Image (tube, rainbow, N blue to C red):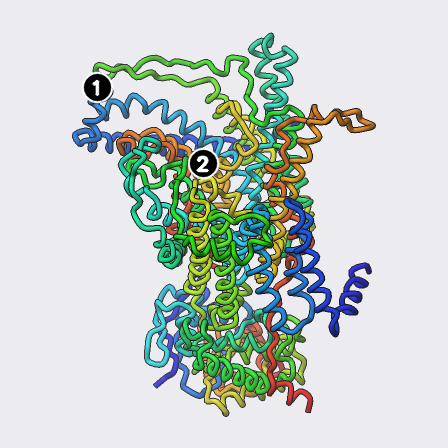
């Protein structure tokens, strides 16, 4: 059974149809990329999946249940975590606390236990802290637990955002342009990180990315969007040779053969 | 000169007038209908009987007799609210910021205008003034109030808001609350030191207190007086002129275009060569000018002012701006008129309809209840568009 | 440059046994000054600031707790009963400190600008004012027309019950108001809470008809206090009589009692605030304050978290309301104006939004400025007016100064200046909030490898 399935999902802003009847399925344990030109509706699609926008039509099923009518926090609690295109960390909080916020849905101690510092509360907090440190190390950050998130360098902030998303133990991880603004070395490192997240934890990953090295390197499946519609999907090899994709990227009448260097 | 005349866009001058007519008539008819219907329903109940006992008049007749005056009062105060609301809406439209001190800008305008007239009065000029002269002096008072309030608004923006641009949303708001409080006491201090009294009275001169009577409307045994005080006419006409002027400025001039550009997207506007700081200053200036004029008009209508005079009109005007759809000029007009009407109707009839349990003393919080209801059920306001939330 | 040298000096002193000596000297000096002068702002300032040397200097935590307890529980009551003026001032400081701490949860931690905070204070105050007075039997009388021999509805000791009831009622009011409006954006929320505060005040002013619940603008009096056994008064006089210099009356001891209650509430608030702030709720508040969209994507239920902050802040104000009603035995709508809300806000902003010591410092500073400096200035001016003094150069006789100029009434000026100046020059406040450093043993170990 598919982990995530959208049926005819549609989102309209005023007269603009940002996402138009997109159907797609995501199998558990896959790494899937969404690509497409700027303004193709990729981020809107993410925002619709995570409940920031409510869709104007269609159906979203996750793990066998509908996500429609759920608030973003309820959707997060069902097991979808995300990162943002323009990093959105809690800048005035420390690195560890950012990760702890990610664990919010799993911390279950009652207000009474919190006030009285009962044993259950102390154990839970200590465990959470340990787990947060582990996650921090897992994404490659060391010795910065007490730093304020806003003081981290750019690449580290991207990693921290991934750690925060992982803290919720998601079934599905949505990454919105995770390699944007990174140099080739950093890009290669995070690409490895994504693969190991899937391999170690079994987390399904859906990412939006413009960097074709990343996309072609780790995706098992690629979805191409343009003008709010899904125009193609398939394996990296299939996408590379799909004429509609080439047209979307290079415009009509593009000479076949020119696309190769752009897409590979 | 010729080019100037050509460049005047007649449509932009007439359109707001039409809107004003529609809004005023619409809200007057709707509210009158509701009041009369309630009166008919309640006439046979204990409410109607109590009134019959006391004044020997049916509730329906009572409501009807008072109706013309209520509508005119509602319209007058509605136009004042609309003029203040425009200041809030202008600033909000451009900066997404609630200029909490706008109510004190309004108060300063009122004080300057009234102080000027009091000075004229004590020099004996008012008593001897002809009708034409008294109108001239009133216009002068309004202009002085406008200049003072406009200058103050620009100064406040420069000193207390501009350094905070770019900080989180609540920071300039807190500063604005501080300015509001500070100005209240500064007015009190200045008035206390110079005149020894901070409750000032609008001097009585000219023919502003007279009533124009249109005649009587016979209705069975009772006569309804149809009339309007000259004050109210002045307030309504002046407010109309301001609204038309503002509408023209924003929709048909270069500066207006720049203001709208900055409101749309400050960053892009600056890339297009618009001096954003200057446009923001102009926005505050225009809001202040309108607020100052509204202050003098308010003083003309209600006679007594004190340093805290801005507080409630300011809040109600803000409620009106939100009701109409904040950031939307036409909405501010509509909100002001509707709110002024609603409030006057409630103030006039609620006491009778509830047999004195809840009367006009609740009219000040009436606006808040509307504000809360609007924000909950239609946060974009009556005329606002439902814009998608920014992610 | 200058602040640099002061900091260096402070660090020079702040080591070894110096802090202990300085703290004790400060306390002894303050106590002696307050003990010997009946109404001196300076003496009071010296004593009250000893809490801050206790807070800032490095000393053993047990020493700090013990000295602080002695100062608050023994020294202040004694000097306070000796010069009841001081006890009144410190009681006011405590009341406002509690309110500021409560508002700090809403504004500082959750980032919700609440401009009608004293509404909840009013809810608590009117709750006890209604049930703890004769008002229940006045329901059918217009204000001022009731017979004088009406009974009280409840015994005075029901006060203790109402301290807890007020928590529930005020929290409930907070949730009731919050549910519809907490979805709103921050600036709208501010205006709506302002409106709510005004609604409560107008209701208090006008709910004297059709049934007389609040007695209108005249307010409710007398409101009962819990009983004070004679034996306590006697015991106090026997033990401390010598130091006080006169026989303490029951009224004096009531003042001490309410001071203790206020202190207790403050301690509870600090305790609760710190524990909650250091849990997932506190982290959620900070996250919501920093970035709502990111917070909600992390599974944080926005409205529920905001409601929690709102209700918690409201409940503390409710308790203080009950305390105020009982200690004053009189309340009227005047005490719950918009200006009071802004006053409490300016305390929070001055001290540092989100900072517990900041809220206390802010409350103490603003209250002292209000009660001591502004009023002192007023007194001074009226003395000048009585005298024949003339301002040299401009040849202005003080007696010509308008009597309208009464600095004690210029609180708005004070609050306004505080808000503007702090926002422009020091938005973090005098004592900015600090986030707790975690030990993170496992992280450090690997970092050093």
For the image shown, how many numbered marks are present on the structure?
A: 2
Q: Position of residue B317 (x, y in %)?
A: 48, 38
Residue A65 lies in quadrant: bottom left
Which labelled disc corresponds to residue B336?
A: 2
* Drawn side of residue B36 relative to residue B146, left or right: left
Front in this rendered view, residue B176 or A55: B176
How far is mark 1 from mark 2, CA to CA? Answer: 36 Å
* Drawn side of residue B305 relative to residue C208, left or right: right
Q: Position of residue C274 (x, y in %)?
A: 52, 68
Query: Which chain letter matches label 1?
Result: B
Query: Which chain letter matches label 2?
Result: B
Q: Quadrant of the N terminus of chain B?
A: top right
Label 2: element kind = helix
Q: Which of marks 2 and 1 precedes in the sequence? A: 1
Residue A148, placed above or below residue C445: above
Dot 2: few (<14), some (14–19), or many (≥20) neighbours within 10 Å? Answer: many
Residue at the image position 60 percent from the left and 83 percent from the top: C440
Q: Would you name the residue on which mark 1 appears?
A: B56
Which labelled disc corresponds to residue B100?
A: none
Residue at the image position 46 percent from the left and 86 percent from the top: A203
Residue C398, placed above or below residue B277: above
Front in this rendered view, residue C185 or B379: C185
Circles 1 and 2 on the same chain: yes
Front in this rendered view, residue A21 or B93: B93
């Amino acid at each position: 059974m598919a982990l995530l399935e959208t049926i005819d999902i549609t989102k309209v802003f005023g007269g603009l149809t940002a996402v138009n009847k997109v159907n797609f399925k995501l199998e558990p344990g896959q790494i899937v990329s969404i690509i497409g030109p700027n303004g193709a509706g990729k981020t809107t699609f993410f925002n619709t999946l995570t409940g920031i926008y409510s869709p104007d039509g269609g159906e979203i099923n996750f793990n066998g249940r509908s996500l429609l009518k759920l608030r973003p926090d309820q959707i997060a609690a069902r097991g979808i975590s995300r990162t943002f295109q323009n990093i959105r960390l809690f800048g005035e909080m420390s690195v560890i606390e950012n990760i702890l916020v990610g664990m919010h849905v799993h911390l279950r101690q009652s207000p009474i236990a919190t006030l009285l510092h009962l044993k259950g509360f102390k154990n839970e907090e200590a465990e959470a802290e340990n787990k947060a440190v582990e996650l921090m190390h897992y994404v490659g950050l060391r010795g910065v637990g007490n730093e304020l998130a806003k003081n981290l360098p750019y690449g580290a902030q991207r990693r921290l955002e991934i750690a925060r998303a992982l803290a919720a133990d998601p079934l599905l991880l949505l990454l919105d342009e995770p390699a944007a603004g990174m140099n080739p070395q950093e890009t290669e490192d995070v690409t490895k990180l994504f693969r190991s997240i899937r391999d170690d934890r079994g987390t399904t990953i859906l990412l939006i990315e413009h960097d074709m090295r990343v996309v072609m390197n780790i995706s098992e499946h690629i979805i191409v969007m343009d003008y709010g519609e899904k125009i193609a999907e398939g394996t990296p090899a299939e996408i590379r040779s799909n004429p509609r994709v080439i047209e979307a990227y290079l415009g009509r009448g593009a000479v076949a053969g020119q696309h190769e260097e752009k897409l590979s | 000169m010729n080019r100037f005349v050509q460049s005047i866009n007649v449509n932009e001058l007439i359109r707001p007038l039409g809107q004003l007519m529609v809004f005023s008539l619409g809200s007057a008819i709707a509210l009158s209908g509701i009041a009369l219907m309630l009166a008919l329903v309640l006439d046979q109940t204990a409410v109607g009987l109590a009134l019959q006992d006391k004044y020997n008049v049916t509730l329906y007749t009572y409501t009807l007799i008072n109706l013309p005056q209520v509508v005119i009062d509602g319209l007058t105060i509605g136009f004042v609210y609309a003029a203040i609301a425009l200041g809030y809406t202008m600033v909000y439209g451009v900066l997404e910021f609630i200029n909490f001190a706008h109510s004190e800008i309004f108060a300063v305008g009122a004080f300057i205008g009234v102080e000027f007239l009091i000075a004229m009065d004590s020099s004996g000029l008012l008593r001897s003034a002809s009708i034409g002269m008294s109108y001239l002096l009133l216009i002068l008072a309004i202009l002085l109030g406008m200049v003072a309030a406009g200058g103050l608004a620009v100064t406040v923006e420069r000193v207390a808001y501009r350094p905070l641009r770019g900080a989180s949303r609540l920071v300039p708001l807190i500063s604005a609350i501080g300015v509001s409080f500070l100005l209240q006491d500064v007015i009190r201090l200045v008035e206390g030191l110079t005149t020894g009294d901070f409750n000032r009275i609008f001097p009585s001169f000219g023919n502003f207190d007279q009533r124009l009577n249109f005649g009587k409307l016979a209705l069975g045994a009772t006569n309804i007086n149809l009339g309007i005080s000259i004050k109210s006419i002045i307030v309504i006409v002046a407010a109309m002129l301001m609204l038309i002027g503002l509408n023209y400025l924003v929709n048909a001039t270069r500066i207006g275009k720049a203001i709208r550009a900055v409101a749309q997207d400050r960053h892009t506007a600056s890339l297009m060569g618009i001096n954003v700081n200057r446009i923001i200053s102009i926005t505050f200036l225009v809001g202040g000018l309108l607020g100052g004029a509204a202050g003098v008009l308010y003083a003309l209508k209600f006679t007594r002012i004190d340093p805290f005079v801005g507080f409630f009109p300011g809040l109600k005007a803000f409620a009106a701006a939100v009701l109409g759809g904040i950031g939307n000029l036409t909405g501010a007009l509509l909100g002001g008129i509707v709110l002024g009407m609603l409030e006057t109707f409630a103030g006039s009839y609620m006491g009778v309809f509830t047999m004195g349990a809840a009367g006009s003393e609740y009219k000040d919080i009436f606006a808040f209840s509307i504000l809360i209801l609007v924000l909950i059920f239609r946060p974009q306001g009556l005329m606002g568009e439902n814009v998608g939330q920014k992610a | 440059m200058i602040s640099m040298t002061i900091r260096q000096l402070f660090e020079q002193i702040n080591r070894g046994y110096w802090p202990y000596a300085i703290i004790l000297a400060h306390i002894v000096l303050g106590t002696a000054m307050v003990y010997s002068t009946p109404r001196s702002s300076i003496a009071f300032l010296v004593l009250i600031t000893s809490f801050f040397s206790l807070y800032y200097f490095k000393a053993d935590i047990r020493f700090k707790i013990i000295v602080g307890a002695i100062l608050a529980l023994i020294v202040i009551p004694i000097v306070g009963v000796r010069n009841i003026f001081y006890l009144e001032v410190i009681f006011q400081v405590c009341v406002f400190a509690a309110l500021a701490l409560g508002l700090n949860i809403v504004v500082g931690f959750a980032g919700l600008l609440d401009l009608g905070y004293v509404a909840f204070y009013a809810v608590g105050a009117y709750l006890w004012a209604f049930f703890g007075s004769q008002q229940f039997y006045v329901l059918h009388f217009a204000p001022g027309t009731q017979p004088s021999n009406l009974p009280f509805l409840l015994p005075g000791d029901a006060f203790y019950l109402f301290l807890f009831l007020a928590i529930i009622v005020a929290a409930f009011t907070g949730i009731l108001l919050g549910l519809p409006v907490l979805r709103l954006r921050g600036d709208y929320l501010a205006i709506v809470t302002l409106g709510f505060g005004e609604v409560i005040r107008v209701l208090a002013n006008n709910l004297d008809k059709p049934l007389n619940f609040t007695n209108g603008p005249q307010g409710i009096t007398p409101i009962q206090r819990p009983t004070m056994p004679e034996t306590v008064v006697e015991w106090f006089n026997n033990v401390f009589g010598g130091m006080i210099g006169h026989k303490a009356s029951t009224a004096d001891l009531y003042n001490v009692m309410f001071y203790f209650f206020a202190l207790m509430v403050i301690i509870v608030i600090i305790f609760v605030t710190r524990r909650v702030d250091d849990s997932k709720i506190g982290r959620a508040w900070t996250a919501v304050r920093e970035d709502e969209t990111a917070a909600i994507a992390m599974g944080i239920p926005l409205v529920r978290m905001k409601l929690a902050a709102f209700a918690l802040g409201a409940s503390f104000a409710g308790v203080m309301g009950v305390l105020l009603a009982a200690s004053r035995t009189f309340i009227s709508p005047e005490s719950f104006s918009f200006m009071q809300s802004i006053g409490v806000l300016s305390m929070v902003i001055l001290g540092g939004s989100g900072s517990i010591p900041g809220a206390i410092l802010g409350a103490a500073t603003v209250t002292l400025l209000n009660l001591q400096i502004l009023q002192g200035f007023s007194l001074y001016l009226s003395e000048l007016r009585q005298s024949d003094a003339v301002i040299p150069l401009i040849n202005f006789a003080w007696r010509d100064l308008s009597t309208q100029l009464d600095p004690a009434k210029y609180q708005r000026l004070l609050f306004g200046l505080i808000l503007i100046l702090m926002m422009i020059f020091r938005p973090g406040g005098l004592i900015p909030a600090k986030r707790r450093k975690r030990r993170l043993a496992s992280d450090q170990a690997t970092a050093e490898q």
